[in-house]
Image (tube, helix red, strand yellow):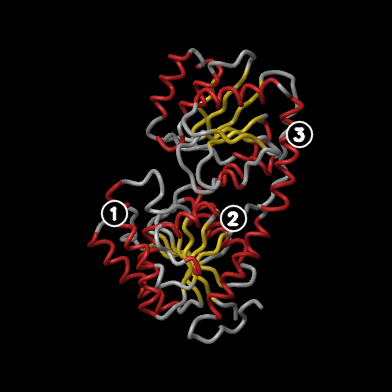
Amino acid sequence: MKPRILYVITRAEMGGGQTHVADLMDGFRHFMDVHLVTGERGYLTEAAEAMGAGVHVIPSLVHPMNPIKDTAATMALASRFGRLRPALVHAHTSKAGLLARMAAAVRGTPSVFTAHTWCFAEGTSKLWHAIGTPLERAASRLCRKIITVSEANRALAIEQGIPAGKIQTVHNGIADSPERAVPESDSGPIRILMAARFVRQKDHATLLKAAATLNRPVEVLLAGDGPLRGSMERLAAELGVGASLRFLGDRRDVNRLLASAHIFALPSRWEGFPISILEAMRAGLPVIASDVGGVREAVTASTGFVVKPGDDGDFAEKLGALVQSPELRGRLGRAARISYERNFTRKTMIERTLAVYRESVAASRNPVPEGWPS
């Protein structure tokens, strides 16, 4: 019988954390009995059901802080853990991480937590920083291991008093795709792709302002949706670049869009370790992105440019260099693909995560479950 593992996350919508969980589930389902616990139905529950994983929806497991719902969710998680008797619980995102670790401790079940970002990272509210930081310190004592998706996130956690010995960096990794870009192509307008929600964090305005400075025809593809889309459409009209922009909305064919592009851009104000950058590197695209979070651990001088967040002038200068030089785009794109193959495949991520699982289960008072991968 396969050992059972439960993945816990609040939201099931399309997002970097959810894509990461789906990749883990798909990678481990071949030798583990994989289950998903979440607070809603959506992209992730559909993906889990398509791969034959168990799906458990707990409506009280919500993202916003709510003492009544949080208590109910913790009790429901403890009950579910007791009934399913997993060998390991792997929690993702801050709220699910706190509640699942408490519930697992109550049941004596070993747990692992992946911090895609931290409550004390840039971009979080002052209230959540004040409340969440001591909670994270306390919760760190309830789990066997904490996985950070970048060395930058690991260093930040240690600064805030999370025990260094419990933290292991495992960079995100993604499955390969046959679709490839040809960034050195120089016929027609140069396509610049940004795939991100229209929220303050992603800072679409920096890309739009840079596009207004370019002196050759470009086509800027903006995949995603969100509350700031309307304001960005108005800004594009004000800058006079509306004709070169295409607002594509939410898309499930991002791989195809990447293959049609010449450059990938992500001028975020803050990040953890963006999967969208890895997808671009997998396609063989040069990347221009803000120097935030763990971005520099993927985007190096040989694969693209990192720019100080909010520096419109530097972003425009670097983007202009990529637009003007097919040789530069091709060289950086080829190096990006090689870096993906060496460092950011799903196989590599699964192997490194499995090592964390083994250590966590071995350190448990429970016997190593039958069928546990050696």
Give the Cα distance between marks 1 and 2: 28 Å
Q: Is residue 278 above or below residue 107?
A: above
**First-in-chain label (2 vs 3):** 2
Q: Which mark is residue 130?
A: 1
Compared across the picture, whether 261 is left or right of 39 comes to: right
The percent position of residue 303, horizontal first and vertical second, equals 68, 39
Q: Secondary structure at mark 2?
A: loop
Q: Circle 3 sits on which residue?
A: 331
The residue shown at (63%, 64%) is 352
Q: Position of residue 374 (x, y in %)?
A: 66, 78
* Nearer to us in this view, 51 or 68: 68
Q: Which residue is mark 2?
A: 171
- Residue at image x 63%, y 41%? 299
Q: Which part of the image, by quadrant, shows the N terminus? A: bottom right
Callout 1: 10 Å neighbours few (<14), some, many (20+)? Answer: few
Is residue 97 positioned above or below 254 on the image?
below
Left or right: 295, with 236 as reference point: right
Q: What is the C-alpha distance between the residues marked 3 and 1?
A: 45 Å
